[in-house]
Amino acid sequence: MRGVDAIVFDLGGVLVDVDIRRALRHWAAAAGVPVEAIASRWQRDDAYRAHERGELDDRRYFAHLRGRLGIEIGDAALLEGWNAVLGEPLGGIEPLVRRLAGEHPLYVFSNTNPAHVAHFMPRYRSLLALFRKTITSCELGERKPEPEAFVRLCRLLGMIPERIVFFDDLEENVAGARRAGLQAFRVSGAAEIEAISVRLALARTAR
């Protein structure tokens, strides 16, 4: 195992629970329609990706969302449902991150959008304080799994990709990170992160 200069964590699905179904239920209730009526229309489409790259602001994305879902509710109701996607920190994650922060520089790299950033930075303040920086796709102008996203990440950190460990819950993002040269792992909870961190620690001892 190669050496490690930093560990980078995805946010949703790695550090905190995320579930789009909470948003769909909220929007359906606000619009007075069955949730099934809008669930089939929801997509992570080009506008969604543009929102995450910072190319589309919240107001314009919400206007797009109203049209795609076929509902007439205001921005406030859309925002409340949108933020409901973000749940609580995953079980066991904060003590694990706290321990790892004593061993390595830690960073967050999340595909996200301005509305979510404004919501989660204060909400997860104590957890995010354990990281040196939270890096977002909407600020970086690129999103995972695109190669340029990882190029910009490494440039921002001032590190070579081979010495960065990256944890994500989506295989496509892990594959993109590996193509860019990072030591990337798909994980779904604290236990898997713990097991990998032990392996990395053993590798350091053996060198």
Image (tube, helix red, strand yellow):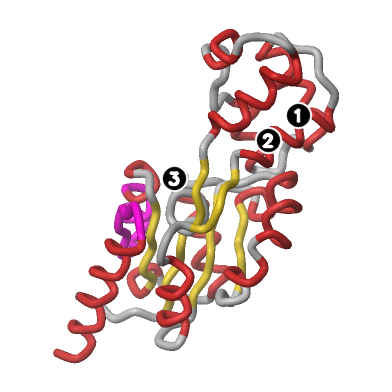
* Vertical side of 72 occupied by 198: above or below: below
In front of the other: 74 or 151:
74
Residue 188 on the magenta segment: yes
Q: CA distance from mark 3 to mark 2?
A: 22 Å
**Marks 3, 2: nearer the viewer:** 2
* Vertical side of 138 occupied by 15: above or below: below
Q: Which residue is mark 3?
A: 145
Q: Dot 1: few (<14), some (14–19), or many (≥20) neighbours within 10 Å?
A: many
Q: Secondary structure at mark 3?
A: loop
Q: Secondary structure at mark 2?
A: helix
**Marks 1, 3: nearer the viewer:** 1
Indicate the position of residue 47 as horizontal and vertical percent values: 65, 27
Q: Earlier in the sequence, mark 3 or mark 2?
A: 2
Left or right of 146: which side holds 165? left
Indicate the position of residue 80 as horizontal and vertical percent values: 75, 36
Residue 118 on the magenta segment: no
Q: Which residues are magenta?
A: 175-189
Place residue 140 in its image quadrant: bottom right
- For the N terminus, which image quadrant? bottom left
Q: Earlier in the sequence, mark 1 or mark 3?
A: 1
Q: Which residue is mark 1?
A: 78
- For the C terminus, which image quadrant? bottom left
Question: Could you tell me the amino acid type at mark 3?
Answer: Pro
Query: What residue sits 45% from the left and 57% below the top?
Result: 90
Question: Could you tell me the amino acid type at mark 1?
Answer: Leu
Query: What residue sits 38% from the left and 60% below the top?
Result: 167
* Vertical side of 183 occupied by 129: above or below: below
Indicate the position of residue 71 as horizontal and vertical percent values: 74, 12
Q: Which residue is mark 2?
A: 82
